[in-house]
Amino acid sequence: MCGIVGYIGTKTALPILLQGLRRLEYRGYDSAGVAIFDGARMQRTRAVGKIDQLSNAMGKSNWAGSSGIAHTRWATHGGVTEANAHPHIACSDDLVIVHNGIIENYRELKEKLGPAHRWTSETDTEVLAHLIESHYTGDLTRAVQTALSHVRGTYGLVAMHAQNPHTLIAARMGSPLVIGIGEGEHYVASDATPMLAYTKKVVFLADGEIAEIKRENVLIMNMKHEPVKKYVEEIDWDEAQAEKQGFPDFMLKEIFDQPSVFEDAIRGRIDVEQGTAHLGGINMTEDQMRAIDRVLFIACGTARHAGIIAKYAFERLVGIPAEVDVASEFRYRDPVLNEKTLVFGISQSGETADTLAALREARRKGALVRGIVNVVGSTIARETDGGTYIHAGPELAVASTKAFTNMVAIMLLYAIQFARLRRMTISTGIKLLNALKEVPRQMEHILEQNDCIKTYAEKYALYKNMLFLGRGINYPVALEGSLKLKEISYIHSEAFPGGEMKHGPIALISPDFPVVCVMTQNQLYDKMRSNVEEIRARGAHIILIATEGDAAARELADDVICVPETHELLEPLLNTIPLQLFAYHSAVVLGRDVDRPRNLAKSVTVE
Ligand code: M6R
């Protein structure tokens, strides 16, 4: 996830900005840049790679200015190149801007601005720079406000202009910005880490606010230019806490990131009016999409669980055969593929060796291969003939959480897009998309139950074994809940489809074997309820994920976690979250290293 640092004061800005960028390294980045007003003109250097590479690129330049902005970029629009790195300028070198977020309508805006502008990158941010410049008549605040009124999307941005280098303009919509208050100096950054060494007094900008930051004061306004009263908060975080935005671990932070990164995944990709989705990265014409007669999802671990959900969605909505394969198995069997088979490789890192090898094999055998990947520019993203980034932002905890929900989101969008080209009605499409738009708010609602889920985790953490059950679309949810629990808490757990219990696993059931059942209100509710009753009859403790308002749930289970009602195919987006929290708190109670569980690596680049 990109990082921003800005400084304005009396000290030399360069070392503060470079140090600030180093503090933001934990967010992950692929390039970096800095711009400083050196007393005469705006100076700018950018480089691909680490901050050291940026320092090297600067050579002996020792700019003396005391105001500037800097950025670490995690590519979203456009490849990892120096030209795409921030800060961006427009036609003149006077205006510089750094930006986090996504400008959805940047293509339209670029077209309107026209070819007369000097375009040097593939980024949405450069379009924003030109837009601001086109409205600039000597007042940067007004220019930013007017430009932003034409923008659709998210931003945390900081801009400065050589004609008034003693003011930084910061604006926020959906992408955090914090202003640090010092004595005769101010800082601005995407989180508090770069400023903690200098001040603990901060102001958090809210969405729709714009700040004029000078040495002596900070003026915060709304987009109508009306002043907004803000309170200075005193934070007592140390650096490690600030990186995690106050959460004790990256995993918990990433679980709580889900509502906002889910919005990033679907933003600009849905067309509610037409009941469809537009994922242009598929690189296929509509006729080619209609000609596909089979789809295959290849992945490992959590990504494979997202693939199982995709299989259910494709079969139900698109009506074509869909299969899921464990990548390490696929690569060594004799899969039957042809040019009408579409293969999706799903991977957070985009570097998983088995997934990569399986995709190469699928391509060799004539299938169409596309990547569903989080890390931009990763090998799978580069080697596939198209696909989609899931926009979950860097996932640092080994246990995958927000990448899972965003993988599911993208696969649902693909299912809708393909289905609308075949048999799905516009009204079904609209219904699904409206339900999808509700998901972030519903996720927030589930996250509010964190304390309650923690008490359940504390109650069960000392059991040696656990079972997870689900049916239909909730079977992969059970698999994912079980994987999360075992990988970070080391409690042995298994997952089964509810209907399989009688074929063996029910022999395990006893009061020492708690069972987590996903029993939300969908077409398999009655079937799942019978499975829960069978378990209850054998004396096991039951933790139930149930739909809000299900009166039977309290009678059946020892402990119940309620989730909001949604479309059946969307249930995994909600039902997985309590299981992530349950696994997380179980691991904490047992004193495990939640972010770095034993024997596991974040990216499995060997076979
Ligand atoms: O980077 P990938 O999505 O390809 O990784 C696949 C698995 O290694 C990964 O999902 C793993 O199962 C996680 N640790 C699960 O939390």
Image (spheres, helix red, strand yellow):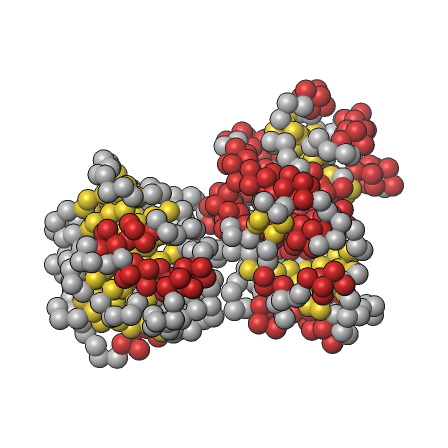
**Residue 442 seen in the current view:** yes
**Residue 193 seen in the current view:** no
Q: Is residue 289 left or right of residue 179?
A: right
Q: Quadrant of residue 339?
A: bottom right
Question: Residue at the location (46% across, 55% down)?
Answer: 104
Q: Quadrant of residue 494?
A: top right
Question: Residue at the location (51% across, 50% down)?
Answer: 267
Question: Residue at the location (66% across, 65% down)?
Answer: 285
Q: Is residue 366 left or right of residue 158?
A: right
Q: Position of residue 578 (x, y in %)?
A: 59, 37
> Splitting the image into four quadrants, where does ligand 1 fall?
bottom right
Question: Residue at the location (25% across, 70% down)?
Answer: 92
Q: Is residue 405 left or right of residue 108?
A: right
**In front of the other: 337 or 55:** 337
**In front of the other: 12 or 114:** 114
Q: Quadrant of residue 390?
A: bottom right
- In this view, which residue lies farthest toward the right? 503
Question: In the image, is residue 247 above or below residue 98?
Answer: above
**In front of the other: 136 or 354:** 136
Quadrant including the N terminus: bottom left
